[in-house]
Each structure stands twice: as structure tokens, then as C-alpha cells.
Amino acid sequence: MQEKIIVPFVDLKLQYLSLKKEIDSAVLSVMENTTFIGGEPVTSFENNFAQACGTKHSIGVGNGTDALYIILKSLGITAGDEVITVANSWISTSETISQCGAKPVFIDIDPDYYSIDVNKIEEKITNKTKAIIPVHLFGQMAEIDKVSTLCKKHNLFLVEDCAQSHLSEYKEIEAGTTGIASAFSFYPGKNLGAYGDAGVITTNDDSLATKMRMFANHGAMVKHQHQMEGINSRLDTIQAAILNVKLPHLQKWNEQRLKNALLYNHLLADVSEITTPKINPAAKHIFHLYVIRAEKRNELMDYLTKKGIQTQIHYPTILPLLPAYNYLNHKAEDFPIASSYQDSILSLPMFPELTKEQIQLLVETIKAFYK
């Protein structure tokens, strides 16, 4: 029998209801104008998102995975190349490297902030290395200034994976503004989420922007005039219209997520079996996910589920230990921090509409479990 959900992991309907009139109107406008591919809503969102991020160009694409792939292909990443990235991320980060014919080179995580350990990057750089992809994981940016310094020193491309970090900052540097190009996802559960798949590439490089836009549109800027072979990856017009309605609220939603995270941290401070997420003093954390480390993680997860509280694991197996990467012959000890954390990390409910009462109930349930 399905347990009644008391605290959902995320509640997308609440956000929709708060903007129902505007969202319905935006979608209806697309239907009435019958501009289902491209059109003003896409152009408008691209311009608005570029302005929000502080970049010159924003290119709407089908999803965040496509965004990464388009960037790498447009940079000329190919067979024989190596691209460095972090061991703990969603597979989009690494599979797009492989899809270009290159080899993903994984780096262990920072023990406090879970992003790429910048102190371990340089030892992995070879004459085959062409790019570094730091992932701004869970809503907190990696040490982008240090990664940028390494890229400049070794003449490497810096590509930011911003799928979880809409409007986050590090040392007042906004996510998506440091690298040659950056990939954003608007998967429905993201801080800025569409009602289907959607993504954006940001860049300040004019020529690269043109090349990426062309590659995403069958290699053509004008229909039937194909300058290259490309792919078909477009930001859907209906999704763009929805995102345009939601974008002005993103900053407020991010602030509410941080407020919820700080309440979690406060209420869980005296639970010795729990390690709460640390916030880098130099970072503006937007808490796409609130990830703890918990003793008896699986038992706790089951207990919470039975009490009607939803949780998830991000991610149950680190990338280099997935079957997809068996050919790289990695062992857990190659990534001591990430591999040791994978059995204890647990993502608790996190969304702007999460109430103080729900958080209090959740924390009391966790305390009851450990008692």
C-alpha cells in the first residue's frame, strides 16, 4: 500500500498554481499564434537569460545534455582528446565527452563542498587534455577562479556545467560567465524548470556562439543553407514561453531555498549521525539540492519513506564506477572521497514552497529514527 506523502521531495504543482494565470496565458499565446518552432518567445527568453547571467550570448537548445555536447563538438573535441571532469555528477557531464570520441578523465571531489577537487586536477593534465568541465554541483559553484588559472596555464578550454547552478556565484563571479561556454539545464526539477526538457548555452565568444547555434540547427543559420553537418536541438517555443514567465521569480526562489537550507542546518546541528552541507564563505549557494551524509543511510531512507517523507540519492554510484566506464578500469580507491560518500549521501526535500513546518517534521522524524 502506497504511503501518504506528507513531505514530497519536490512539489512542482505548487509553483505552477502560484503562476497559473501567467503561464496559461503564455502557453495559449503560442497556440494561438501557431509559432511552434522558434519565434519571439525563444528569442525573448534567450535575451532575458543572457541578461540575467551576465553573458553576451544565450542559445536555446533541447536540453542540458545537448548543451554540453554542442559546446564540445563546436570546440573541436574529438577522438584521442581527453577532457577532465568530476567523479560525482550526472552522467550527462561525462557521456557527452565520450560521444565526441574523447576520453573522460575523472577527478575526486572536495571533501567539504563536493565539487571538483582543484588541487588534484593538474596531475591529471597530459598532452592529450583539451578541456576541463567543472560541475557546479547541488547549486554551489566550484572554485572557478582556480580552474580558470589552470586552463590558462595549460591552454585548455574551460566549459562550465551549470545544470544545477542558475544564478549562483563564487567570489561574485556568476555561474556561466568564466568559461569559453557554459551549459544550463531547465529540467522540470531545476531551480528554473521548464515543463519538459529544455536547455541553454551561454558564451561571450561571438564566433563560437554562431558556430554552436548553427550546429544545433542542422548546421545552418538559414534553412537549406547547411554550412556543416549538425544536429537538431531546439528550445521548444512553449517551454521558452513558460521559462519567460518563471525567470523573474528565480532570484526570490533561490533565496527561499537558501533560507530552507539554513533552517535544516540549524535544526540538524545536534544530530551527531548527520553531516549537513557546508557553504563556502566565498559562494552564493542556491541549493538546487540539499544533500546530507547520514549514518545508516539506507535504513533512514526507508524509515522516512514509511513516514511519508520522500528522499533521493544524488548519486548512488559515482561516474567512474558505473558499468558504462568499466573500460577505464577504475577502482573505488582511485576516488577515495567520492566513493566513500556515495553510500552515505542523501538528498532531503528542497523546493522554494517547502514550509517551515514540513522541515521541522522531517527533522523530528530523523531524530526519532536515530533514537
Image (cartoon, grey):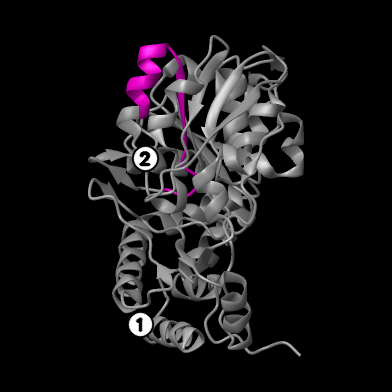
- Is 65 rendered above or below residue 283? above
Residue 110 x %, y %: 41, 44
- Assess whether residue 209 is covered by the magenta stretch: no
285, 216: nearer the viewer:
285
What type is the residue that disc 2 sits on?
A: Ala
Distance, label 1 to label 2, CA atoms, is 29 Å
Instruction: Give the residue at mark 2.
Output: 175
Instruction: Give the residue at mark 1.
Output: 356
What type is the residue that disc 1 sits on?
A: Lys
* Residue for point 46% across, 21% down: 123
Q: Is residue 142 left or right of residue 21?
A: left
Q: Is residue 31 left or right of residue 111?
A: right
* Residue for point 28% across, 47% down: 283
**Residue 345 disc label:** none
Q: Which residues are magenta?
A: 147-165
183, 221: nearer the viewer:
183
